[in-house]
Image (tube, rainbow, N blue to C red):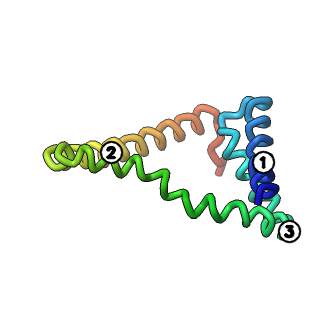
Amino acid sequence: MLPAFAVLLAFQLIGESLARVLRLGIPGPVIGLCLLVVACLASHRLRDFTLQAARPIISTLSLLFLPAAVGVVQFLPLLKSQGLALGVAIVVSTALTLAVTALVFRFVVHRLHLEERE
């Protein structure tokens, strides 16, 4: 399992290196994961080999949500009293973010003359 874990770390290192050298706005681990997916699609042997290290990691992934759950329980009285206001704030801010993103996208497309010509 250790060699398979080393392969996973190697892809993360490659992704991190590419992100830093090319100064991409994408995190290195995301690039490494994309490269790993492409490599696993190309080689079933690599997929089967890395699967032995990936399964235990994925099975314990839910532990990362534990701190968030503890935070929710810790602030439960606040959520009971302010839950509606928080819910409205989350929904409204999400809708505003989507609307502003769409407007900025349209502005950039119009400004750069990328619209389809009919």
Residue 88: in sight, yes or no? Answer: no
CB under 8 Å between discs 3 and 1: no
The percent coordinates of residue 41 (x first, y second) are 80, 65
Q: What residue type is labelled 2?
A: Gly
Please state the horizontal and vertical placement of residue 18, each as a whole percent of the image: 79, 37
Q: Which label was assigned to residue 11?
A: 1
Residue 14 against residue 22 in the figure, above or below: below
Q: Residues under labels 1 and 2: Cα distance?
A: 33 Å
Residue 87 picture location, percent across and down: 25, 49
Q: Residue at x 71, y 60 (%)?
A: 53
Query: Which quadrant, please, contains the N terminus?
Result: bottom right
Indicate whether 79 appears above or below 50: above
Residue identifier under label 2: 71
Q: Name the residue under label 3.
A: 45
Mark 1 neighbour density, 10 Å: few (under 14) some (14–19) many (20 or more): many
Judged from the image, the secondary structure of the residue bearing numbered disc 2 is: helix
Q: How far apart are marks 3 and 2 (CA)?
A: 42 Å
